[in-house]
Amino acid sequence: MRLRVFAVSLFCLVAANAGAQTSKAQAGKSPEVRIDYTQETLPNGLNVIYHVDHSTPVAAVLLWYNVGSKVEQPGHTGFAHLFEHMMFQGSKNVGKNQHFALLEAAGGRGGSDINGTTNWDRTNYFEQVPSNQVELALWLEADRMGTLLDAMDQTKLDNQREVVKNERRQSVDNQPYGTWLEKMGEALFPEGHPYHHSVIGSMTDLSAASLTDVETFFKTYYAPNNAVLVVAGDIDVPQVKQMVRKYFGSIPRGPKVPALANMSVPVVIGHQQRYVITDQQAPAPAIYVGYRVPAATDRRAAAVTLLADIIGSGRSSRLYDALVRRQQIATNVSGFNLNLSSGADELIFIATGKPGANADSLEVAMMAELAGASSFTQAELERARATERFGFVNGLQTTGGFGGRADRLAEGWTFFHDPNHVNKVLAEYDRVSLDDLNALARERLLPTNRAVLIYVPAKKTASADTRIQ
Amino acid sequence: MHSAPRMKIVALSLAIGAAAANAQTQAPPAPGPLRPYVFPQVNQFQLANGLKVIVVEKHNLPEIEGRLIIDAGAQREPAEKNGLASLTGRLLSEGTADLSGAEIARQMDALGAQYQTGGGYSTSFADVVALKNVFPQAMQLAAKTVMSPSFPVNEFTRVKNQAIAAYQQFHARTNGLASDAFVRAAFDSTAPFSRPPNGTMASINALTRDDVVNWQRTMYAPSASTLLLVGDITPAEARSVAQQAFGSWSGTRVAAGPVVNPVHASSGTRVILVDRPGSVQSTIIVGQPGFQATDPEYIPMLALNHVFGGAVSSRLNSNLREKHGYTYGAFSGLDLRPGAGVFQMSSDVRTNATDSALVEAIAEYKRLGSETVPAPELQGLVNNLVSGFPNAVQSVQGLTGRIQNLIIWGLPLDFYTTYRERLAAVTPEDVRRVAGSKLTPNNLVVVVAGDLSKIEAPIRARNLGTVEVWDSNGNKLR
């Protein structure tokens, strides 16, 4: 499966392909896919994007706030995400559990249609509902953007702090290999860099979060001028525009958002890093390799994704062929990038050993394969492109929710100041040449530009914890 | 057109101003007129070899899913061959007479097709999702792997080792340990559903290539299979794709009878504990066996489940997460399987709250039968299912999954044409009735996987039922 956890998706209508005789189309050509939209900016600075699709009576409301864990200061890791939880605890006109209760009663499925997510670069909130309920979703989003602090209290914070600690336990501390993402950020970005620490944050910092922090964070980042609102699907744009003005128009513009710390890092790290982690719960060894690569907003971003696919994604990838199929030392491999927006991104390759495999042998085999990762073939490039084309169209099926069309539009605005970015994605993949790929691999896939995490089951003998300078 | 909406705004903002001046809160806006939704028509036909084909059209994007399901799931494998259906399914993609597994993978990826084969409890399957322009080719290649797999010896060994590894990885997690123990405790040991669908370490280890070859030869047949074609495809195109891909498939199979799944006979609640030292969270599961979709009470059961834990705003999550902070989430569901499915809640809870979370979950379970659900609560949660349905079937995968379930569960293909109306008609009395007749809150299966050095004593002290400690293979230790 090539689902990339960190990517978003979007939509279109393909009038050109709607007929019955399109099977003559070339396999090696991108389908014609276009997402139409209109865009406006309210006087308070709120950017709004409208996208119409009447094919099903579903509408999506989605807000991206331009704030993520990268704004967190030392001692406050995990706060952007904890704050996201507080946004579901009610506001002036909405009781504690009412956000989900109202939206679920309106026909939005909690979790998949109604949710919020935080990553390094942004925080999003979304509601996918029957199209006659779009006004409810707009009202709820506006109420918390305008009046969250009116309903904030210590009990809510204490409750959600516990919930988030449970989330950390569930996704990190209680899972085999659960710490890899946290350790990888720490290794690939220097101390003090905004991507050095994890989104989920440390237990100590979560414990220290206060109501004052909630208030300050809200006043600093949660303002119309630091957000983009997307309303998509089965909507009447003039009518929805009136609703948007009615609910969001009176929310005052916030102060200018503080400038980010310097995100830039050297092109390559400059020294080798190797960490051995003894894992109480892992039944087999696993190797996680991360490289520092161009960020998601870089013109080489498409090449980074294709590189991940060719080397480590799917059953025709190099790592699968070598480690799983031929050498039979691993049982699973994967390759993907995190899509970090600025400074640099992380390109990750994972190989999980077969039961009883020796971690050292698995490491040697994986490093050998990565060392030879260049001289890609046109066939490999075309396979990766075909995969991404499919993934893109597949992601366009839903109006909202995780990675639906609304999310794609917001992403374009937030990271590229261009809602039309969605309509350029496939062309970006089409543009990548073999030379581009080979050049990127030669420049970045270096032992001095990566971190290697070796997870060894506790019962096995672990090599020494070393860091090779 | 412009002036009317503007006037409306003035009126509404005055109203808001008045409300704010008077008191505290604004009411949420009322919904607009509901727009119609019609579930797509489900067409079906049969090929000459007996293969049933079901077509659901959805033309807004050039994407199609083709899913072949074969009545050859783990439920039909002999107990001593546990894991055979799954292993055989996995191996389909690993070689045909003229293509190696590597070559099949390269060809599918060159088409940009998502291709998966495998086997679950109820069926074995081959699934292809691809853009329309390459779909016929991808479907044809997938069909070839189903009809004439070669099961190369080296791939057999490799995939078998992968299955063993997957079992170990699953059992390295509390939810894997708990879910396996739950079905073992809920069903009689003779029931296929008491066994893990992918097999155990020992049973997978014992499987041979001959077992796989024989399973495919005797169990895979067009008359025992259904092909679902969903997405940007017309019935005429579907007929041609199906004929091209599967027209040459021959072979017959003796019709298989219904699967018998006796539940575990016990009186009183059983509490099964499985140790995972070092866990900072425990997985808890509370439930009971005995539910199926063909039951006339299926629709009220769905509503009951939604009151209990089917949604974020349901009772379980409101209690265990929002009130007590024991967990990141607590949910329940009906895992419907032909013959006898299960109704269960599960949650990952922090270690030192494990016993308290169990007490709350069981109390909520009991409350379903002892109190009538307030009408507004029921109405909101039922409407979540009713109105949220179109959201869930925007993708070909969402549609395919739902049609597949109808076939597996033995429901009519037009089930979804009246599904929403039937749900909307469920009353609090219906829920109370079905809770009374179906739920056995004093005869539950409770399973906990976590660090027993920390949780066993507190759980025993709660006197929830008979406590047993099992190893990860279902053997009773004490």
Image: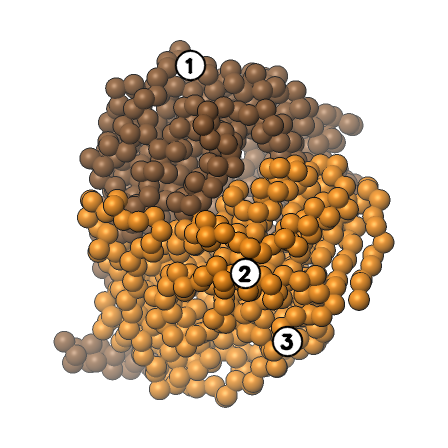
Chain colours: A orange, B brown
Asked whether residue B138 is in view, the answer is: yes
Q: Where is residue B148 in the image (x, y as percent from the top left)?
A: 43, 23
Q: How far apart are marks 1 and 3 (CA)?
A: 66 Å
Q: Which kind of residue does numbered mark 3 sit on?
A: Val
Q: Which chain carries label 1?
A: B
Q: Which kind of residue does numbered mark 1 sit on?
A: Gly
Q: Is mark 3 on a helix, strand or loop?
A: loop
Q: Which chain carries label 3?
A: A
Look at mark 3 in the image and give the residue it sits on.
A265
From the viewer's perspective, is residue B141 above or below residue B174?
A: above
Q: Position of residue A455 (x, y in %)?
A: 74, 50
Q: Residue pushed farthest bottom? A: A255
Nearest-to-viewer mark from 1 and 3: 3
Q: How far apart are marks 2 and 3 (CA)?
A: 22 Å
Look at mark 1 in the image and give the residue it sits on.
B257
Identity of the residue drawn at 49% across and 29% down: B95
Look at mark 2 in the image and give the residue it sits on.
A438
Mark 3 or mark 2, which is nearer the start of the sequence?
3
Considering depth in this image, is A415 or A132 the residue closer to the camera? A415
Q: Distance between the residues labelled 2 and 1?
A: 58 Å
Q: Position of residue B59 (x, y in %)?
A: 25, 48
Query: Residue B283: which quarter of the image?
Result: top right
Considering depth in this image, is B94 or B204 the residue closer to the camera? B94
Q: Where is residue B172 in the image (x, y as percent from the top left)?
A: 69, 40
Within-10-Å neighbours for mark 1: few <14, some 14–19, many 20+: few
